[in-house]
Image (cartoon, rainbow, N blue to C red):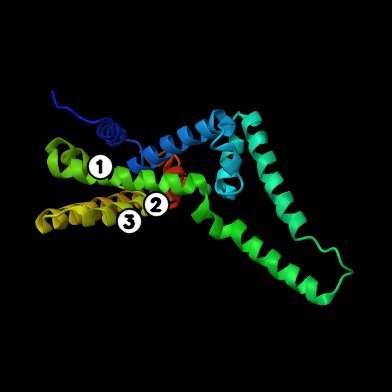
Amino acid sequence: MKKLKLEEIKLYEAFEHKTTECPVCNLEKNYEEQLMHSILGERVMDLDFYPKIGAEYKFCSTHIEKLNRGSDKLGLAIMLDKIINKKLKDAKKNKVTLKPDQSILNKLFKQNKEVDKETNAELENHCFICSNVKKHNKDMVKVLVDLWIKDSEFKELYKASNGFCNKHHLNILEGSSNIKSSDHRKEFIDITNKIHIDNLERLQKELQWFIKKFDYLNADAPWGTSKDSVQRALQKLLSNY
Ligand SMILES: [Zn+2]
Ligand SMILES: [Zn+2]
């Protein structure tokens, strides 16, 4: 029997999952869930982790929202308390103590605008969970590319997959730069693009049949595989949905 590393087994399992629109999304979701579980469960009490919450370890609004979907409200409350503590400290440091003077107000307004900018798009780059997920994806793509080179059985599984979401399609193409042999690299890029295009077309056909089913003439025709095509189209387009 073939000897596989743990990460390789995870990849095999993700690609054997035939109903997903992107096996890399499944891996990302599992990793993200484990990370969020460990943040609210153990790390929030950890003496190294806790003091950095809100300062070195920031969290984007998407991940705070995802943390809120879980059941661990105690862990989340401890985390939010620490973040508010940091915000309070910052607010007290910047507070206006003089009579409202236009130049100070302008300065403060400018500062707030910078803070606002940080809470939106920029924070995603600094979010503790986003950056760890990004690193995990990069590591998994490396394992994927290595496995594709050395394992013919995986190569077949890869070819028969349902393709990838837009984000992971690009991640995988980026990962192909690690392939030393230019022949292998070309073969990998060609097959990856073929899988992506074939499966976008397949999904589009399913969506188009979904739309046609709303015509009364098709009321009695079978749904085929199109019944959940809207949900799968969202997976394909939005990644980790
Ligand atoms: Zn994906
Ligand atoms: Zn995030």
Q: Which amino acid does label 1 sit on?
A: Val
User: In the image, 140: left or right of 101?
Assistant: left
Q: In the image, which is nearer the foreground, mark 3 or mark 2?
A: 3
The quarter of the picture where residue 95 lies is bottom right
Q: Which numbered marker is on residue 170?
A: 3
Q: In the image, which is nearer the foreground, mark 1 or mark 2?
A: 1
Q: Nearer the viewer, residue 202 or 63?
A: 63
Label 1 CB less than 8 angstroms from ligand 1: no
Question: Which of disc 2 and disc 1 is earlier in sequence?
Answer: 1
Quarter containing the N terminus: top left
Q: What residue type is labelled 2?
A: Gln
Question: Residue 16: image x %, image y %?
Answer: 27, 33
What residue is shown with label 1?
Answer: 143
How far apart marks 3 and 2 lie (CA) works out to: 26 Å
**Marks 2 and 1: in contact by CB < 8 Å?**
no
User: In the image, 167: left or right of 143?
Assistant: right
Label 2 CB less than 8 angstroms from ligand 1: no
Helix, strand or loop for disc 2: helix
Q: Is 74 situated above or below 23?
A: above
Question: Residue 64: image x %, image y %?
Answer: 59, 43
Q: Which of 152 and 156 is in front in this view?
A: 152
Q: Which numbered marker is on residue 219?
A: none
Label 3 CB less than 8 angstroms from ligand 1: no
Q: What residue type is labelled 3?
A: Leu
Helix, strand or loop for disc 1: helix
**Marks 2 and 3: in contact by CB < 8 Å?**
no
